[in-house]
Image (spheres, rainbow, N blue to C red):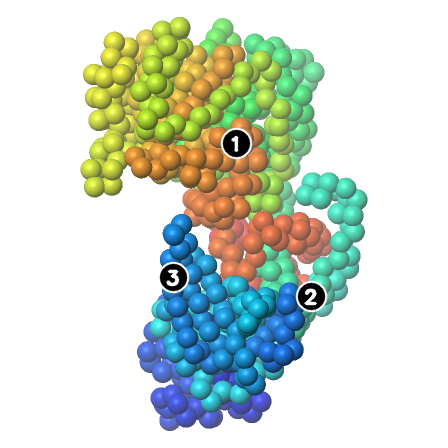
Amino acid sequence: MSSIDPIQTALSRLGASAQSPPPNEKAAPQSAPPLEVGTPLQFIPGIGPQRVELFHKLGVRRAIDLLFLFPRSYQDIAPFQSITELEPGIRASVVGQIVDMDQRVSFEGRSSVGVLLAVDGGGYVRCVWYNQPFRRQQFLMGMRVIATGIAKSTGISFEMRHPETTILAADQPLPEAKPIPVYPLTEGLQQRHVASAVAAVLENLTDAIDEALPESIRLAANLPVDFVASEKLGGPEAKSFPPLLGIAQALRSIHQPKTVEEANDARHRFIFQELFVYQLALAMRRHRLQHDKPAPKIAATPMIHARILKRFGFELTRDQLQAIEDVRTDMAQDVPMNRLIQGDVGSGKTVIAQYAMLNAVASKQQAALMAPTELLARQHFTRLRQQLAGSQVMIELLVGSITQRERTELLQRIAIGTVDLVVGTQALLSEQVQFESLGLVVIDEQHKFGVQQRANLRESRMVPHYLVLSATPIPRTIAMTIFGDLDVSVLRDKPPGRATVHTYLGSTAQQAKWWEFVVKQVQSGRQAYVVTPRVESDAEAEIVGAEQVYQQLTTGPLAGLRIELLHGRMDGSEKQAKLDAFTSGKTQVLVATTVIEVGIDVPNATVMTILDADRMGLAQLHQLRGRISRGSFPGYVCVFAKPGVAPEENARLSVLASTDDGFRLAEQDLQMRGPGDLLGTKQIGLPPLRIADLVRDSEVLIFARRIAQKIVEQDPNLELAEHAKLKRQVTLKHGAVVSLGDVG
Ligand code: ADP
Ligand code: MG
């Protein structure tokens, strides 16, 4: 594992590493330039060409990158003990030489690796790891090792289960009992290599690193925080965080802490900084959106309000009414609305969008609705047209598949304002789409678009109001990170009369029985989806594609039913025809790929079979399941994994079956897989985080956001001298977020 190089300590004490190449490494070039933050690694004494390559793999290219290569964790060396001082149950460190090693596999298949240490001063301690066979490769006979853990007496000697270990070089003196950093590594690079490279730059450079956080912010951040309004904590509670260390101190403490507390304080500073700088970027963008150009005031008079509500054929839920109130208030201002409607699948977000659009049209403004797929755009279009039947509202569809002539003609009508509502896909973002007076933009299923794209749909004199809908149940902390510049309305309660959805984990043996059930449901008048991730089969990967599934089902268990196939490779009109046939009830069973994941709404479809579900993400599975919880009949989902995998052994599938609450699912998914996987960070524009963790550090995030908002209220463009370095950080890291493409 890790170890402290004697050179490291020596060098850092000398504080003159630039001039003194360590003896056991290739000498640095004679003409080594003085060490600066931008000095390339190959000019740093002690780092040979091979190691430079390895560091490059870790993204470390310059001296400064070494400083910001933070330890993943620390081995917290407890006081060293001799055997006679060891007390069972108490954490301690021993140092000794490896005199025996063993690797076993128990009858039940549990593996163990044992390492016997002859402890300095006499006696033995056996270190043991279960189910970590790779441990065997880390040790060699004769190595000197520090082991830290809880000792257990075995009668004759002591045993430590899963101790932390550090390998010492043969002649290396015992380090002091202080935490040893554990760095991220790549093959061929060892802990002590990293530690000594860091040490070579640490003393010389820390004072050259810019302090991005001015004292005023550090002081503010040291005050206890009142979390009264925080959803996260629910109740009034004051919380204080560790003080924010200055940059030089923080760098020293994160790499060479004397105690774990010191290391944690240093980590806190960098976690705060990382979250704070991003929240600043978002707050700045929000400020610009709100102050740059006015939006048209669109006030819904009581009469307009009542008339729009009457068009919905049902009573709105309390949350829907609240969200509509929020939207109504926002749109009446000349500050552009920037609101996110967040709600689980089937919570009825479309209603809010429809309200906003009709409100815009009632004020003689145009509105645009953008959907991520053509299928969904068409569905919205059809619904709106039905809803607006008999009214004067002119609504059109702008998607990639319309002919050039239709398109040209449509663009003209949009430009002169004879079209009130335009529903479309990304095609709406094209430069050629000019509106006469665009008052509102609605973006459905925001998570399928990048955050940046919002910027493109802008109009010159005024800016439109923005409403974005997101069905991905994003945990609050993530939403805050991604949509930190949006106001949020949440739809928690589902429309009444929704029957429950039952989720089953099916084994291969049960499949025949399940198909019988599907047939019965369909014969009683319901419809069914069969979803599989791929179009084509792949024998090697044991994937049965949609085409083959379709063949098998039509000739096998579902023979006699009206089955159709729908997948992403079909052209737009074919897809639409297939979907129309299903919507109208002509098709009873739709075999599809995940093209139907988003937004499709066929209330009579109540049965869904998901094949190869172990290949799909939890969020995606939940979206799919959302297709069948839309009517008053109970829904049934059965998920099957690939042959040989029992679905209940797949953690994601078990979670899926355990709850129907999208928010809870999202939290669990996040814990299991990290935020990147949940949403596809790139797609959504989530910044890569080096040290902060959105789940673990959610309180710091809330706190950082508040301070960011305060700063931007006072100094919206960070023009004050004391904010200059902070501004550089924001621009460097999140320039794209702040600049929005249309402001300098
Ligand atoms: P999502 O939030 O997933 O976009 P939709 O807006 O598509 O959900 O709504 C799902 C279904 O619920 C639609 O068929 C819609 O007509 C219906 N619905 C929405 N609100 C209500 C309500 N208040 N009462 C009854 N049905 C509703
Ligand atoms: Mg929807």
Q: Pinpoint residue 390: horizontal percent, then vertical percent.
A: 49, 6
Q: Up-down: is 430 above or below 687? A: above
| Front tag of 2 and 1 | 1
How dense is the environment of label 1, judged by Cα within 10 Å: few (below 14), some, or many (20 and up)?
A: few
Task: Give the image quarter of residue 397.
Answer: top left
Q: Pinpoint residue 174: horizontal percent, then vertical percent.
A: 55, 84
SS for dot 1: helix
Q: Up-down: is 294 above or below 48? A: above
Do the residues bearing badges 2 and 3 touch, measured as CB atoms within 8 Å?
no
Q: Up-down: is 584 above or below 239? A: above
State the CA–CA distance, disc 1 to disc 3: 37 Å
How dense is the environment of label 2, judged by Cα within 10 Å: few (below 14), some, or many (20 and up)?
A: many
SS for dot 3: strand
For marks 2 and 3, the one nearer the N-term is 3
Task: Give the image quarter of residue 75.
Answer: bottom right
Q: Pinpoint residue 229: horizontal percent, then vertical percent.
A: 74, 42
State the CA–CA distance, disc 2 to disc 3: 48 Å
Q: Which residue is mark 1?
A: 658
Task: Give the image quarter of residue 104.
Answer: bottom left
Residue 218 - label: none
Q: Which residue is mark 2?
A: 244
Q: Which residue is mark 3?
A: 104
SS for dot 2: loop
Q: Amino acid at mark 1?
A: Ser
For marks 1 and 3, the one nearer the N-term is 3
